[in-house]
Image (cartoon, rainbow, N blue to C red):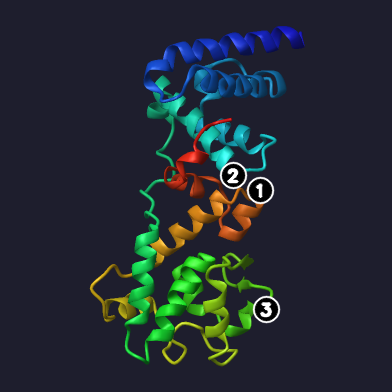
Amino acid sequence: MYGQSAQAAVVFAADVYRRTARRIPYSLSVAVAVLQEHAMWAHVDRRLPLDVEVLFRRDVIGVAVSQLPYSSPATLARRRALLLRVAEALGVTERSLPPLAGSTPSSPYGLKEIASLRVWASVQREDRVRDAWMLLSLGLGAGLTARELMTTSAADIDTDGTVLVRGANPRRVPVRHEWWPELSALTAEVDATAPLFRPHIATYANKIGDFVRSSWGDGPRPTVQRLRATWLVAVMSDGLPIQDLLYVAGVKSLDALARFERFLPSSLLAVP
């Protein structure tokens, strides 16, 4: 019986590829390998019927991908993306599935833009330079959200190069090595219990936005969303195990990260 189920899954995968080949940007070898693995998991392991309306539901795809024996989050995201594109080509997503992760993600900064942001931080008034560098260090170095960035204190920065994040998504985040020297030096300049960013100004919703809007400089100015997006893409490119990636990012679902797959380096986009 097991052999018959496996054979049926292989035939099903080949048929799905035949139906969608002209509408998905994947080669025969790549697509069929992924489709066969998905059909085998669903039909043989989970005893689901070989029905595209079942196997290509978004929740089924999510569970299947989460159980793949791969450590790279980029690989998991690519597998999921391929299966979702097949689901769209089959018309399953149009009838029963919501768009992936809702809104369009903020684009990460490129290397030239990051260099310009460093210039931006350097040309601020003397009493604002430290805060400008702090914004970049916590955003690009640790990927903090706006609320986390405004409430992190010097006491939360450990000498081992990590940031203790408190609040709704508590975690300990390793600071990216290129930003640790700045953050470490800046931390020594403020009281341990005070917020690192603008310590003498009370926290309020638009604290970061108001600071950036009133800053000097002719080049690009930072936004927390793009700082975090840049950090997320860098961490995804590192190949952390998926659970570690979800933990340091402070998110519960791969959906929140899969949106950023489009920004990964092209060398990571081939599906193994």
Q: Are marks 1 and 2 in contact (CB under 8 Å)?
A: yes
Q: Considering only order in the chain, which callout, 2 or 1, is on the residue closer to the N terminus?
A: 2
Residue assigned mark 1: 241
Tell me the residue at 39%/73% (across/down).
118
Q: Secondary structure at mark 2?
A: helix
**Residue matched to label 3:** 159
Q: What residue sits right under mark 2 in the picture?
A: 73
The answer to whether one can see residue 238 in this image is yes
Q: Position of residue 9 (x, y in %)?
A: 63, 13
Please state, as top left, top right, bottom left or bottom right, where the C terminus lies in the image: top right
- Foreground mark, 1 or 3, reads 3
Image-quadrant location for residue 163:
bottom right
Q: Is residue 181 above or below residue 106?
A: below
Q: Secondary structure at mark 1?
A: loop
Alpha carbons under labels 1 and 2: distance apart: 6 Å
From where the camera sits, is residue 144 visible?
no
Name the kind of residue labelled 1 in the image. Pro
Give neighbour class at mark 1: few <14, some 14-19, many 20+ (Cα, 10 Å): some
Callout 3, which amino acid? Thr
Question: What's the CA distance linking mark 1 and mark 3?
Answer: 24 Å
Q: Is residue 12 left or right of residue 241?
A: left
Identified by mark 2, the residue type is Pro
Tell which circle, 1 or 3, labels the residue nearer the N-terminal end. 3
Q: Nearer the viewer, mark 3 or mark 2?
A: 3
**Closer to us: 132 or 3:** 132
* 189 left or right, relative to 173: left
| Front residue (pair 177, 200) | 177
